[in-house]
Structures are given as C-alpha cells and as structure tokens.
Image: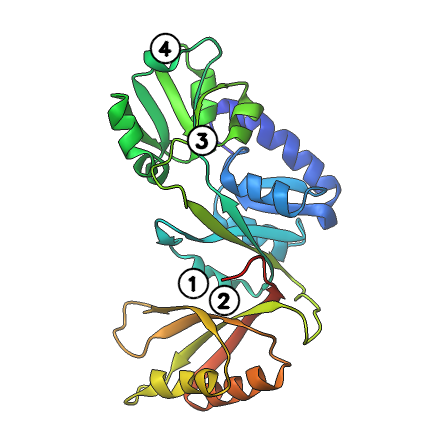
Amino acid sequence: MDTYPPKARELVSRLSQTAEASPETTAAFQGAPGAYSHQAVRELFPDFAPLPCVSFGAAIDAVSEGRARYAVIPIENSQHGRVADIHFLLPESGLSITHEHFVRVSHCLLARPGTRREEVREAFSHAQALGQCRRRLEAWDIKPRPTFDTAGAAALVAEETAPGRAAIASALAAELYGLDILERGIEDAEHNTTRFVALSRKPASLPAEADVMTTLMFEVRSVPAALFKALGGFATNGVNLTKIESYLRDGVFQAAEFYIDIEGHPDQPEVARAMDELGYFTKWVRVLGTYERARAR
C-alpha cells in the first residue's frame, strides 16, 4: 500500500473493500487506480469490481488465491513490444487466458484545476509514457519527470501545491483524482495500443467452430532445424501464426522457449494435426489458453 501516493491509497482502500465482498465479480490489475490496466478492466468487465495490485505477480496471486475471478494483464504494446517478464509469469501462474482486449492508449496532460497548459514546466509519468509523448513535451518546453506509473503520477500531482506541475495519464485518472485535462491525445504515435489478456483459474469453454485464438508455449529440442520442423505443421495445415517470440530462461544459452499465438481452436482438425507435429519436435508444449479473438489481425 505504501507504494501508492496518499491520494491513490484512499482509492485503493475503498476499491479493495468492495472487491473483498464479491471476489467472483472482481478483476485484479497492476497499478494505481486510473492506470490503463484499470481502464482495460472497466472496458472488458464493466460490471466487475476493480482490484488494484502493486505488481503483476500480486494481481495473478489474487486470482490464484480466490480473491478475484480475473487478472487483467498487459502483454504487449504497439510501440514498445512485449511487457517485461509477462511471458515468464503466464506459464508459471497455472492460470488460463480466457479473454483478450485492446486499449487505445490516449495520453492526457493533467493538472490541478485552474492550471493553464502554458504554465506547466514539468510533467510526471511512467518513463514509457513520457517517451511516447517526447515530441509534444519538447515543443512545449516541458521537462519529463519519471515516476512509478501514470496513475500514480496523477495522484501525486493532485496532492501538489507547487505551480507548473502536470501528469501524463488517462482521462480516467483525471476523473478519479479531480484533475483538469489540459490536452488530450498528446502521444506521438496515433497507433499506440496495448494488448491485454484476462487470466482465470478456469479455462474458457468455447466450441471448436468459434472464432478464437490459442496461445502456446514450448521448448524446442536442441537439434538442427528443430524450430523449422516444429512449426512446419502449422504451415502444411494452413494454421496462421500471428505472433512468435523466443526466450532464454535462467541465463542458459541453450535451446530457447517460444511463445506463439495462433488462429484457431485445438479441437479443429487442422490445429490438432499441427499441434501433434509440434509435440514431436519439442521437449514440452503448454496451452496457455483458447479465447475469443478481440479483433482481426
């Protein structure tokens, strides 16, 4: 709790009490209230109680321990790529991906009521958010000041009495902390979007014919062309891969682990054949979840 600024702590306490009363209709997220992960919870589960957590691991633990039904976690951003450590946390959690959701990240310049944009000399936010607004800040001669997260920066600015300070955060953060929105959409890239997944103790139950994605992880055998052969079944069976990433675990430069997203359900014949071939050329395969596709790739 001490990780959050005082203004945010008040909200965290209230939201946590509400969530405690109804864990089956609670969705956990990482960050202070008003974070983009909080926005993702609101959009994906509008009738659920949001539960703020100080880390991704804490949000996942809330589900594992039965204090929340879902954890809503960011896994990649259109500008910055994958979110650090998420692909290690997902398989270790023992949870299943049940949903995906895309949030258009629209950064706002927020300040205490009565502040004019021309008066702002410093902007506080997460380092990534500051980097995503670099050109606009330079044009306005505003100095970037990194903080723990975007919503936490908004809470800090709400408590500030010194003039000339603002935060870069969501419109939701402005609403929660009583700040004015001086400028909207100040990010440099118009495509700035974050992909979130929802994790649950129970996998989604979807028919084979549904329009779904499946996420897998596997480790290839340490033999020549192992990855080529492992993935060959997806090509020959017409199964589309929309994402593939490799990871080295425990600092050992040996056979890599891979994370892939595919279009299709494991019960579809072509997907089942591709996965059989994948299993033949790998040490292990783990299905992290099959879930409805949120949008076309």
Q: Residue under circle 4?
A: 162
Residue labelled with disc 2: 91
The amino acid type, in three-letter code, at marker 3 is: Ala
Name the N-terminal-most of marks 3 and 2.
Answer: 2
Residue nearest the observer in this picture, 292 or 222: 292
What amino acid is at disc 1?
Phe
Residue 126 image label = none
Q: What x and y, as percent, mark residue 74? A: 48, 51
> Which is nearer the N-term, disc 4 or disc 2?
2
Please determine whether, in this image, residue 43 is positioned above or below residue 216. Answer: above
- Locate residue 281: give its quadrant: bottom left
Q: Reply above or below: 118 against 134.
A: above
Marks 1 and 3, the one that precedes in the sequence: 1
Give the Cα distance between marks 1 and 3: 28 Å
Q: CA distance from mark 4 to mark 2?
A: 45 Å
Q: Identify which residue is drawn at 36% across, 41% down.
A: 189
Amino acid type, callout 4? Ala
> Pointer 3: what residue?
169
Q: What kind of residue is marked 2?
A: Pro
**Residue corresponding to mark 1:** 88
What residue is rendered at 55% in x and 49% in y?
59
Residues at circles 1 and 2 in contact by the CB criterion of under 8 Å: yes
Q: Earlier in the sequence, mark 3 or mark 4?
A: 4
| Position of residue 163 in the picture relative to residue 254 (left or right) | right
- Classify residue 38 by image quadrant: top right
Contact, CB < 8 Å: mark 3 with mark 2? no
Say what secondary structure mark 3 lies in. strand
Marks 4 and 1, Cα distance to the nearest angstrom?
A: 42 Å
Secondary structure of the residue carrying tag 1 is helix
